[in-house]
Image (cartoon, rainbow, N blue to C red):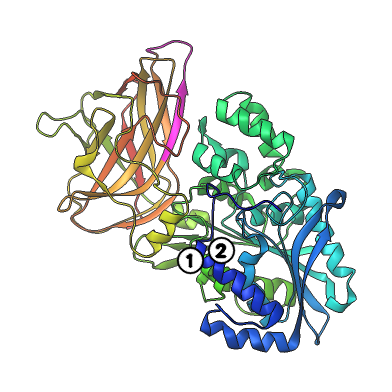
Amino acid sequence: MPEARSDRLRLLAPDQEATAFAVVSDLLTGNAAGVPEYLVDDIAAIRGRCRFAQVHIPGYGGDLLDAMAAWPISGGPHALVVLPAGLDPAGWKMYSGALIRLLMRGYAVVAYTERGLPGSGGELTVAGPEDVADGSLVIDWALAHPEMQADPERIGLAGISYGSGIGQLVAQEDPRVKAVVALSTWADLGEALYDNQTRHILAAEALAAISEKPSAELVKVLEDFRTNTDIEGVLKYARRRSPAHSLDKRRRVPTFFTSYWHETIFPQNQLLTYFAEFPGPKRLDLAIGDHGAVEIPGLLLGVYTRTTEAAYDWLDHYLNGVDNGIDNDGVVHTETMHSFTVDSFAGLDGWSSNPVRTYHLTAPTSGTGDGALVLDPPSDFSQTIGSGEPNIRAVNQLVVDGFRERLLMPVRHKLAGIDRSAGAVWTSAPLPSPHHIAGFPRIRLTVTPTTKAVTVVAYLCDLDMVTGNLKIITHAATTVSNAVPEHSTAVELRLQATDYRVPADHHLAVVLATQDPLYAGETEPGTVVTLSAFHGAAGIDIPIAD
């Protein structure tokens, strides 16, 4: 089987991967070398009352899927949980901790690596029909092995990242699935990768690099995406792989979703739109960090995390009928940056329907070269920026930044370091009290490029004027395309959902630029962009909870 390349997206750090492999080895052989001490007794206990088998399960077309099957030897029949792997070279082994915790709760479990990924046969189709068929065939395989004592009436799918999307799609097709856990997931793959006419290139390239066995169709789609050709074909490919677009197949399967405020693989707005209309039963957790930052320690190491424990409780309730309260403690759960306080709400509206404060943009002043965010609209507003990177970016490293953020080390940018020739800056007066921003900020202004097309990236930031540090609260990008240069376009851009408490005496700051490495922009070198209020007042609407 092909080895993992160094440029691939990795959900696990090398030391985490080594731990996962050690735990799997202990489960299979009883050799505890390299296993965290707190897991040794748990593994010994379940080895005494469970059976384990590393197997290859025939998938669609006979392609073999690398898998681990495990089950208690008594007390059946057992609810069955199927775990499709996240998009990481470790494959199903990333669920080493989840295997332990699910077995301790009495489940039969099959964790498997999807087609085209290291260890499994077939070609990578990115949650295509073959992957959906594979999920059902894994269920068939488990039910066909009587020693597992899997109950055909109590079947759940749980996964993170890539596996979470596949789990949702299988549940829409297979009526045997009674519960889903979708961690760090997507709903509309097209919007996740191509929102506001802007290509989310860094994530697409990282995802593409995971496999050395892409299907011919995937190769073409990726090339079209890179070259910005046949985008409609790319979106059609993504639509078939999006739970949000399966309206005719949408089943009321109880589903637990998670995402992050600084999610860089599947930005959260597309999931929230789907969640609002999902028929339920449903639960959503939105946390500090990026893709997998809360769940990975729990799934990998078996340690307590808020979302993995909620996932196990979700399965217990909807597969085993356990009255544990998971169905009545709130539908939406939000973690506030960076206090880590968690609030619960009856729905998305209860969280996001907050009073909106509008800050208007003013022209730069002669003293600082920056504009201001003011409550009263100015009589006029206009300024220009050029192309180039302004020394602020949405993310330095996919996934990694999110783990650091959970360790209270969010990425900081220097206000003084922003290149004002490539980035426009506006700051508010110091806030007299803490401000809790919760919802979807929106920025409005007129954009006039000297070329036919330009990409605009907007960042809402928390500014500590004492240190000069900027922390990005949220951001978004949009691309304006016109038939001729010098055409003025009214832009209204919804930023990614956020939940952030700005300390007293800090300032709000808005930065606008025309480039960010997270995106494949349309800004040509030498482009000059005029930002103005030509088509109406220019400003940002910020939902403030308190």
Cα distance between the residues tagged 1 and 2: 7 Å
**Mark 1 Cα within 10 Å, few/some/many (few <14, many 20+)?**
some
Q: In this figure, which residue is indicated by the disc labeled 1?
A: 344
The quadrant where residue 365 appears: top left
Please provide percent x and percent y for residue 479. Answer: 46, 27
**Mark 2 Cα within 10 Å, few/some/many (few <14, many 20+)?**
some
Please check the rendered image and state whether residue 362 is part of the magenta-colored stretch, yes or no: no
Please provide percent x and percent y for residue 377. Answer: 24, 32
The quadrant where residue 180 appears: bottom right
Q: Amino acid at mark 2?
A: Val
Quarter of the image that includes the C terminus: bottom left
Please provide percent x and percent y for residue 14. Answer: 51, 62
Residue that sits furthest to the top in the current view: 484
Q: In this figure, which residue is indicated by the disc labeled 2?
A: 331
Disc 1, disc 2: CB below 8 Å?
yes
What residue lies at 57% left-to-right and 75% top-to-bottom? 302
What residue lies at 65% left-to-right and 61% top-to-bottom? 159
Please provide percent x and percent y for residue 375. Answer: 23, 39
| Residue 168 visible in the current orientation | yes
Q: Amino acid at mark 1?
A: Ser
